[in-house]
Every structure is written in C-alpha cells, then in structure tokens.
Amino acid sequence: MPEPLLFEKSSPGRRGFSLPPMDVAEKSRDSILPREFLREHGPSLPEMSEPDVMRHYIRLSVMNHHVDKGFYPLGSCTMKYNPKVGEILSGLEGFSQIHPLQSEETVQGAMTLMEELAAYLCEISGLDAVTLQPAAGAHGEMTGIKIMRAYHESKGNPRKKIILPDSAHGTNPASATISGYETVQIRSGADGLVDLEELKRHLDEETAGFMLTNPNTLGLFESQVMEISGMVHDAGALFYMDGANLNALLGLARPGDMGFDIVHFNLHKTFSAPHGGGGPGSGPVGVVSRLAPFLPDPRLTRTEKGLRWEDGHDISVGKIHGFYGNFGVMIRAYVYIRMLGPEGLRQVSRDAIINANYLMRKLEKYFELPHQQHHMHEFVLSGNRQKSRGVRTLDIAKRLLDFNFHAPTIYFPLIVQEAMMIEPTECESKETLDAFAEKMFEIAEEVNENPECLKEAPVTTPVGRLDEGLAARKLNVKYLLS
C-alpha cells in the first residue's frame, strides 16, 4: 500500500521533541527580525512522535531503490557503492559542526584537507591547478567554459563557438550556451569515435574550444585523442574534457598527458559520495598552468600564518558559489583517495573495465551491440531486436524493476536507437553481474513468448506503470491542507 503523507498521519498536539525552559531573557521578536519578515501565524506542520516519523522514512527507504539495496547500473552516472567509512569520518564534529564564516584560524584543518584534495586531483589528472568551488558536474562545466571565455578575451577575442560530438552529455551544449557560445555538433564515425575529418571541417579561428568526454558516452576510449589535441590547439582553441567517465582512467591515463587544458571532476561519481535524488554533488575544475590565473575567487593560499582565502585576482572569473564548494562531499572524496592510494585507485579502473566487458559479452547474445570492440567501464546495447517484436527499451527497463534491479540509462546516447547504457562499476561481484544477466536473458525470452507482460511492468513495485508524459506535463507536488 502507498505510504500516507506525514500530514495525513498527523495528530493534533502530538510532539516528537521536548525543550528545556529558556534560561536567557526572551527578546521581542521585533528586535530580532524586521516585522516584514515575520509571519502572522505559525507554519502548519505535521504533529507526530519521533518513532512515527522515523518509521515513515524507513518505510519510504525500503520502497525506494538505492545502491545500498541493489544493483544500480546507470550508464555514465557511476552509481557506485559508497564506503561507510566516508560517512563516519565526514560526520566528525570538527568537520560537521563548522561554518564557512568562521575565522580562518579556527578551521585550518578543514582548509588543509581542501588543499591536499586539490593536490591529489592535480596528480590524478596531470593538470596544474584545481578549484573545488563548483557545486556539481554541470556547474563545473559552466565554470570551465567561463575560464575558456576569459582566456580568449585576454587574447582580444572571445571567439564564437564551441564544438562537441553528437555523443556529448546534454549539459555540455547547455553550459556552452549559458556562457554565450554557439554550439556546433559533429557526427561520430561508424566506430563510435570522433570523425577527424568532420572535426577538421569545423575548426577555425572562431572556435573557442572542443568539449570531449573520454572515454566517450559509448564507453569507448578516444584512441586518436593526441591527434585531436593537436588539431584543436593548432586552431588556437582549448581542449575540454568532461570528467564524468574518469572512473575508467584512474591510475591508468591522465587527461593532462592527453593534451586537455580543462577538466571537470565529479567527486560524487568517481570518488564516492552518495549520488542521486538531486545531490549532493561536487564538480571541481582542473586547468593547465596558463589558465590558472582565471580560476574562481576566493582561492586557498598558504601564507606564513597558515592557509587563507584570498580574493582580488584581476582576471579571475570571480565567485561562482556562495562559499567554497560542497565540503561534505570533499571529505568523502579525500577519504576515498587516501584509503585506496595510487594502486587502489588503479585497481578501481581495472575492475570497472573488466566488469563492463564481462557483462557486455554475456548480453550481446540476446541484445544488439552496435560497437563490437572492447569497451572501457560502460557499454551501450540497442533494443532494436526487441522493438521489432513490439517491445520498447522502456518496457525492458520497467520489467527489470520487477526483478529488484534498477534499470540502466535508456535512450542515451541519442546516436544509438533504443539505447541501453550499462555501467556495472568496480564494486559489483561476478555473482551480481551473472544474476543481472540471467534476468536480462529472461526478459529477452519474454519478448518472444509473452510481450504483453513487459508492457504492463512493473507489477511488484509499490507504484505501478506511470503515465510519464502526463506526470511531466501536470506535475503536482503541493499538498493542500483541508
């Protein structure tokens, strides 16, 4: 049965807390806040006991699917398991009970963690300087494009366009457009990689940069990356890497060594922080030395008196976050890197690559595999074979929910029809991958024997098949009190 809302479970006069009597003089409300900011009546909030509130959220968590509960193979999102040691250490009082407006002298430990994390990201990426300020991946993209624009403006011409492949994440053209650039999309080759001739046709003196995900969203390593880098730089443009798929490169290859000038990291994907449900995220940006002067302010600077935040850099793109970034995510990433060390990070990528290719070769027997070469950490199947029998990729995804597996990313990238984008990550065991493959085989058989059962799925979940179009057009998230 659906879980009632807290408002529906509320009972007048019931409370989940008790406070001791005030031991300081109570001031008039008007002396604390201006009258225009005060409400005439208290908010209408649910009235419940603590056990009832706790059980409500526990029931919701059991109804929901999450990475602690089961396999979550979202392609390109790297929904990896998060070690609980990161949760424990990020909850230490010296981290969780500080405030960004505290005096710098009182938070030197936190600032040292940020300094060391930035240094680790520089070493992992092969870049020279990092800002931790961006709040998530897309925010990091926007920051990187602003740095790109500031760099070209310092040369006397901001340039007009940014080139990206047709396999790019949707946030890439959005970030470029928000920053005032025209976006030019180029076709991938039949092998799923950048078509060098196509790129050459569009590179000119008005190109500000080329944005590339490597490995790309098909899960393929751009083997001609050095040639691409040379072409981009010969045109006077900058080479940007979307770091969403960095989980495939840790300790194996560095973006800076490939010629990238700007890279954004997703700490919540690659370096283990709870991911999903809208956050939290963290999107640091790394740059080569000639772009470091354009990084956001304020910047962490080591002085004789310790670490300080410094503003006022003349050609900085300015502040792009209310404070200094999502610190709780930084702690978890720092713990993850320190816990694994260089060889451990390298093993992360090796295992992610092995898991992806193992699962891919099992599934290609039942589903189309558009690109036959070995992949990196993820791969894309096509449901075209099933579509010919009247079953869509969406139906396959819904049916997986009945078997307690989250669906992979579907219908992305757009260059593969009926796409299913699968990333098992390094965390999953062979037994889990085999169990997932077996259910995919069962679904493939159902397509032939009983396709209608897929069109009705899911049938075992707390909520059945939704009219997603109607939900998107008539979204209602407001509860009206009677």
Image (cartoon, rainbow, N blue to C red):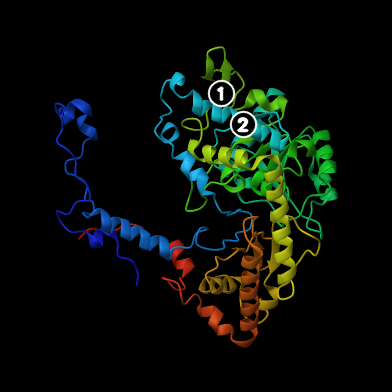
Q: Would you say residue 277 is visible in this rendering?
A: yes
Q: Secondary structure at mark 1?
A: strand
Q: In this orientation, which residue lies closer to the viewer: 448 or 198?
A: 448
Task: State the mark number for residue 118.
Answer: 2
- Can you give x and y, in whole percent of width and height, for residue 238 in the image? 74, 35
* Quadrant in which the N terminus is drawn: bottom left
Q: Position of residue 285 (x, y in %)?
A: 62, 35
State whether residue 394 is above or below residue 138.
Answer: below
Labels 1 and 2 touching (C-beta < 8 A): yes
- Please tell me whether mark 2 sits on a helix, a strand or a loop: helix
Decide: few, some or many residues near mark 1? Use Cα within 10 Å; few <14, some 14-19, many ≥20.
some
- In terms of depth relative to the viewer, which is nearer, 253 or 81? 81
Residue at x 65%, y 62% (from the top left corner): 422
Looking at numbered disc 1 in the image, what kind of residue is underneath it? Leu
Residue drawn at 59 percent across, 39 percent down: 140
Determine which residue is flagged by label 1: 300
